[in-house]
Amino acid sequence: MKKAVPFSLFIIFTLHSCYQPQRDCTAFKNGEFSFTTTINGEKRTTTFIRKDAVEIDFYEGVADTSSVRWINDCEYIVKKINPRNKAEEKSIHMKILSTAEDSYTFEYGIVGENKKSTGTALKIN
């Protein structure tokens, strides 16, 4: 009995380590998406259209265009084309962690900084 417990734990950890989340990132390179986040206790939604090397964001009635540089199928760098301040001049590294039929979970952060956040984008079209 004592030998069965370590063996069972070994099997459980082995099977768990084999799980890989679905990552069909190419299905999300182009399209229309929405992303909702909480800012100061309020839910805010932005929509964006990404086509090849350009992304147009729509937030609170304002459109903003960014360049998109794909590093690989699941990672890309976003940089505002016409930044309005120093904060907007910084590039953002985006990494798709997993995908579903109509959404993807991603990690993002300012290039060169360690702080990362996560979110989920929903494909609208």
Image (cartoon, helix red, strand yellow):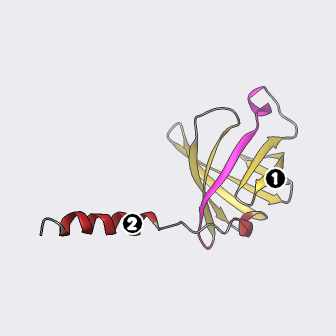
The single residue placed furthest to the left in the displayed view is 1
Q: Which residue is mark 1?
A: 55
Please name the amino acid that badge 2 sits on. Thr
Q: In the picture provided, is 5 more to the left or to the right than 53?
A: left
> Quick one: 51 or 125, which is closer to the camera?
51
Q: In the picture provided, is 36 more to the left or to the right than 94?
A: left
Please name the amino acid that badge 1 sits on. Glu
Q: Nearer the viewer, mark 2 or mark 1?
A: 2
Tell me the magenta residue range. 86-101
Q: Quadrant of residue 74?
A: bottom right
Where does residue 104 sit, x and y in percent of width and height? Answer: 62, 62
| Residue 11 covered by magenta stretch | no
Residue 93 sits above or below residue 124 on the image: above
Q: CA distance from mark 2 to mark 1?
A: 41 Å
Residue beneath the point at 87% across and 37% down:
82
Residue 75 sits above or below residue 26 on the image: above
Q: Number of labelled discs?
A: 2
Residue beneath the point at 74% across and 67% down:
26
Residue beneath the point at 64% across and 32% down:
113
Q: Which residue is mark 2?
A: 14
- Per the image, label 1 sits on a secondary structure element best described as strand
